[in-house]
Image: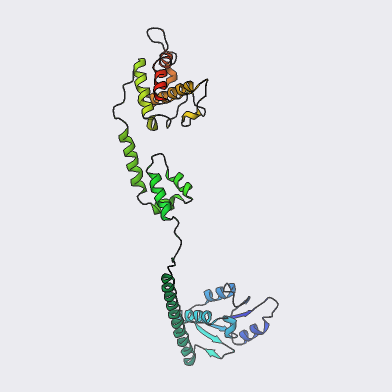
Amino acid sequence: MGYGRVSTRGQNLDRQIRALTKCGCAKIFTDKLSGKNTDRPELIECLKYLREGDTLVVPSLDRLARSLQDLITITVDLRKRGIGFKSLHENLDTTTSGGRLVFHVFAALAEFIRELIIENTREGVAAAKARGQRLGRPKAMTEEQVSHAVALLSQPKASAKAIAELLGVSRSTLYAYVPELAAIRAAAAKQTAAEVPAQRPALTREPEAWWQLAEFTLNHSATYGWQLTHQLYPANPGHPIPVENYPAGNSRLRRNIVAAQAAAAAAIEDLTGHRVQDWEEEEDAAGEPYWEAFLDGPLHELARRGGH
């Protein structure tokens, strides 16, 4: 098999092809690229095409490679694969005993160059360490970012996605640099649950019971208040209900009442599975709607007390 190359498309390959054909090459591969360009498609195809027992023929060594390292790499690979090598200009033929000696020389040169590279690398690493230079790939997260992430993860409302976006890293990076993430979140959730009394006020249709449940709800609003979804008075139905989203009304007290009402209603629906709207038209023994009695009585006092 033959291989020829010229540096530019303007140069002619005819002379090389004639020489390769004359010496018996059954198939010839050619490139019109600089020898410095390691991406030589026809050479790559030629080397793939060769099989054990074949011989690669080139017009001269500089047609195969423009650097000693490149030449050594190719010829050593050919030797390992049991493929012969001939260079017409240098009269080099590794299928002969004298030519095989050249292969051994090339192999020894390859090992020598490899050892030089290793030694130079070691010296460079040692010198960089002596200068205090940090080696290797830069870390995706700094120690300060990791500390921030751990601090944020202790807050139950902080999601891994939000923290990753805040720190400018991916969630996979966050999990890689904060392996205790799952344990921290579980501990935080457990602590939050422990802060909420296990015994909730019993729910009846008496206004006093509603008052107790509303007070309980507002005291533990992080769990049963505006984290829940309520459809009665929200500015954005189906979304969490922060106080500032509720109608301003005529006064701060009115805002407090509406916020307390919404939080209590959300808790009632959450704890019982009953929609508060279903109770709005029902009346007590005195003919007063339960919800009206709740709004006009204890809830006003609750709003004043809690400042909600």
User: With respect to residue 250, does 77 lie above or below?
Assistant: below
Q: Residue at x 46, y 44 (%)?
A: 162
User: With respect to residue 303, does 118 lie above or below?
Assistant: below
Determine the image quadrant of residue 141.
Answer: bottom left
Left or right side of 45 for 287: left
Which residue is nearer to you in this view: 75 or 227? 227
Determine the image quadrant of residue 298.
Answer: top left
Determine the image quadrant of residue 7.
Answer: bottom right
Q: How many marks?
A: 0
Left or right side of 31 for 71: left
Which residue is nearer to you in this view: 242 or 92? 242
Residue 171 locus on image (x, y percent): 44, 49
| Residue at far top of view | 286
Residue 281 locus on image (x, y percent): 44, 13
Q: Residue at x 44, y 79 (%)?
A: 114
User: With respect to residue 271, does 164 lie above or below?
Assistant: below
State the scheme by which the image is colored: rainbow
| Residue at far left of view | 199
Residue 145 locus on image (x, y percent): 43, 52
The quadrant the N terminus occupies is: bottom right
Whether residue 1 is visible here, answered yes or no, is: no
Which residue is nearer to you in this view: 213 or 70? 213
Residue 150 locus on image (x, y percent): 38, 48
Whether residue 114 is visible here, answered yes or no, is: yes
Which residue is nearer to you in this view: 162 or 34? 162
